[in-house]
Image (cartoon, rainbow, N blue to C red):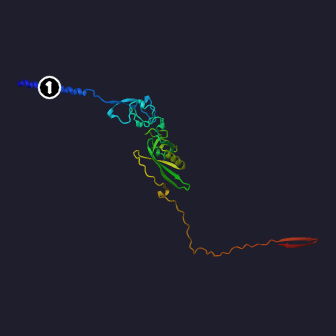
Amino acid sequence: MQRHRVLAAFGIAWLSALLLSYWVYTKSTAPESRDVVSIVAAARDLAVGTRLQQDHVKLVTVDRKDLPKGVFQNTSDVLDRALSAPVTANELVLSGKLAAKGSGDGLTALIEPGLRAISVQVNEISGVSGFIQPGTRVDILFTRIFTNGEAATTTILQNVKVIAYGRQFDPGTRPVATDNSRPTVATLLVTQDEAEKLVLAAQRGRLHFSLRNGLDDVVAEPSEPTESTDLGIDDPRKPVAPVRSSMAQPQTPANPPQAVATVVPKTLVVRIFRGDKVTEQTLK
């Protein structure tokens, strides 16, 4: 009797283990139900300023819990809008990388409302040897040379965004190297007042760019212009003529004699002929 109880208990345990293993197996191999959603992504690499068309985008599925902010669920929401930043293939199209509706394409799509794009002529030296790229930020230094030969330099604008360098406006694209003597242009994103200041400065002196770190957005307080005296170099002084001793100087009389003009009266001699007699008469 005892033996039958042991065998029954062993059979029940074996059956329980078999049922448990089958349950674990079915749970691990069964497809997991996912809460997914379809969102808009790029179908291929797209450059800045591209106006999105139907063949530029596609729908991809992403877990709802992994959705980033600014996604679009319908392709119609992004069509006919320009990109303000480059997008690679299969990358999600976010609202932060799209220009406003009706803002145009190309460079105009990069101009934020209320701002202006203005181009400034630069060369390899004033343009930081060509290391300025679209998307970088710069300070603008103005140097004026006065009519007396003196010069002064001051910073007129700070933390200005470069949206194009030459004809390149894709961020991270380095401009093609050019001859140092061949100028190019940098297109800056500024306010209306800053645009007027830049145009005037370009007419009155020289402009130089100072490249900033992309994480540095500190705007310093305005300072006094830097002049040549601030460099520790003064204008050379003219030598002063030596002063002679009073002993070696000739004495000048208090009342020096003045020249007196002598007037010599003019005389006129008249000869008078009377027959064979000649007489002379002097007239004064």
Quadrant of the image for the N terminus? top left
Q: Which residue is mark 1?
A: 14
Above or below, 236 relative to 46: below
226 relative position to 276: left or right: left
How many labels sit on residues? 1
- Which residue is more in the foreground, 34 or 141? 34
Residue type, numbered disc 1 = Trp
Pointer 1 local density, CA inside 10 Å: few below 14, some 14–19, many at least 20: few
**Residue 126: x %, y % from top left:** 49, 47
Residue in view at x 50 percent, y 54 percent: 152
Residue in view at x 48 percent, y 38 percent: 108
Residue in view at x 88 percent, y 73 percent: 280
39 relative position to 250: left or right: left
- Which residue is more in the foreground, 177 or 219? 219
Secondary structure at badge 1 equals helix
**Residue 30: x %, y % from top left:** 26, 26
Which quadrant holds residue 76? top left
Which quadrant holds residue 77? top left
